[in-house]
Amino acid sequence: MIELVQVVKTFQAGLATPFTAVDGVSLSIPEAQITVLKGPSGSGKTTLLTLIGCMARPTSGRIHLHRLPGNVLPQLQAGDSVEITSLPERFLTAIRRRTFGFIFQQFNLIRGISVLENVMLPAYPTGEDHRSVEARAVQRLESLGLGRHLRASVERLSGGEAQRVAIARALINDPTVLIADEPTAHLDSRLSEDFMALMGQFKAAGKTLLITSHDPIVHGSPLADRVVELRDGQIVAEP
Amino acid sequence: MIQHPGILALLLASFLVSLLLVGAGWQGLRILHGWDLKSGSEGQLDLERRTYLVSTLVPFALVIHFLSLFLFIFTADNLHTQFVGAMCAAGSLAVNPFGYPALLANIAVCLVAGMWLILHRADTQGYDYPLIRPKYTLLLGLVPLVLLETWLQTRYLTGLKADVMTSCCGSLFGHGRQGFAAELAGLPPRTMQPAFWATFMLLGLAGLVFLRSRKGARLFALLSLGFLLMAVASLISFFCLYIYALPSHHCPFCLLQREYGFVGYPLYGSLLGGGITGLGVGALAPFRTRKSLVVTLPGLQAKLAWTTLALAALFTLVVGIWMAMSPLRL
């Protein structure tokens, strides 16, 4: 579904101290599978995720999304392909919103508002009816065992609960791709295994999962279909 | 040169617009020369980012130009007291040989700039830069036109000298005189009145046909241009007579004065706006089948067609009210 062709990302390009974080990566990420990007800090995993997730543009190279769902852009039909690095920002926003769900390393929940409001937030710009968004958010939270925390403030949650709220938020717009950046960095072993089990459920439901991690519980998990190793911005090992 | 706030603002605006357009034109040249959307090279991605720079600069510059056209007319009208014989902008513009050419160049830039903005708007509706080549080709055509307009306007404004003897509008737009303006003034109202109403009806009919069937975009554009020209000719030939309530005063510039409620501004604004949007409907017609525009372009064309019809109706309504209220009967 996602195809990267010779993707390069150089920070400070043209200045005295350029730094190439991703260096000529070509990769295919299949649908409905778990792909893990592993590698040491500074290997370019997070940069690659931000490029795939339409949060940054590469310096060169192209990224294609194949077999899109039907509701991404009015100009595109279900099953069409689109090249995302050339897209003007307004289209990129629509694709980012409809196609990708993000689970950040620090969870990035917004303090001061409730769990339910945090989960509903990414759906507000879509203009969808508030009640249907709320019903979906409640259903997502209940399925993740957070039904009793709907009105709680996010500051009161444990690490594992906060991560599940972040997962529910990533799922609110029903994306086809879930992107998780070092999701187990702040979790103990049991919670990390729970997280992978949850990812296995999403995979079974047809979601494409892209996870960066150097946690053996993640890249060594039997649920991971593919592990791609990065070092110095380049792919060094791929099964 | 006369030290006048309007003159200084116009000179500043025209130099600023020229500077921005030359910069954008240079980027446009690079884009036209190196554009290859299939390539993922660093150069191509850099060009894609440069399109955003141009998309920000050019609309800003063109909006300044649209405003400066009306400031140009206002300033010319405002300065008429400085020249012997001038009664309105018609006399001010005749003070030196660059006045009328500067006005015409200003209007031409507005029409082309309007086309560019419409193409730009349509281009941004497509996800794959569908109109990148026509848009930047038009931009490269617009740059010399803007430079010509800046040169003419600068020559005109810097060449203004107080107490120069000039012609009044009565002599420029009077019966029995030589020249294009006098010929327009001499067009017979008995012929022009039915011709104007027929053009208005035809435009409305073509607009409704287009809006219902999405066919006849080019015909509608042609009729929009026809209506613009016919409306200007009719304004000079007979609408002015009703507005001034004088059977022999055909000046199209006195309409801009306080005595006539500044009615010239909405009249010329609606004509120019309607001309641009009407021509835009036709300009977009060849691109309707492009895959990334198939969904959005018909909607944009419909909006432009509605705007054209609304502005034509506004013009007709305003002159109609003045005709009805005028004590003059031809």
Image: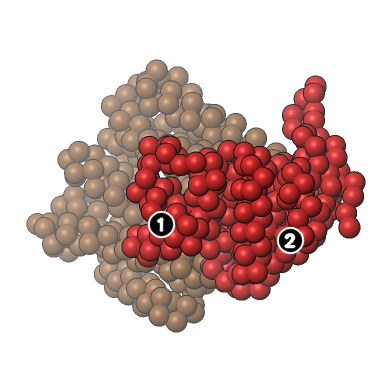
Chain colours: A red, B brown
* Residue B293 x %, y %: 58, 67
Q: Residue at x 38, y 53 (%)?
A: A148
Which of the chains bears the disc numbered 1? A
What label sits on residue A60 in the rendered view?
none
- Relative horizontal placement of residue A130, taking residue B152 as reference (left or right): left
* Residue B167 x %, y %: 35, 36
Residue B242 to residue A154: above or below: below
How many C-alpha atoms fall within 10 Å of the one at disc 1: few (<14), some, or many (≥20)? some
- Choose top left, top right, bottom left or bottom right for residue B211: bottom left
Q: Residue at x 37, y 22 (%)?
A: B5
Q: Can you say which quadrant of the picture contains the C terminus of chain A?
A: bottom right
| Amino acid at dot 2 | Leu
Q: What element does badge 2 sit on?
A: loop
* Residue B133 x %, y %: 69, 56
- Choose top left, top right, bottom left or bottom right for residue A223: bottom right
Residue B115 to residue A181: above or below: below
- Relative horizontal placement of residue B303, taking residue B325 as reference (left or right): right
Q: Residue at x 57, y 68 (%)?
A: A75
What label sits on residue A223 in the rendered view?
2
Query: B201 and B64: which one is in front?
Result: B64
| Amino acid at dot 1 | Gly
Q: Pick whichever of labels 1 and 2 is earlier in the sequence.
A: 1
- Relative horizontal placement of residue B140, taking residue B62 as reference (left or right): right
Q: Which residue is mark 1?
A: A147
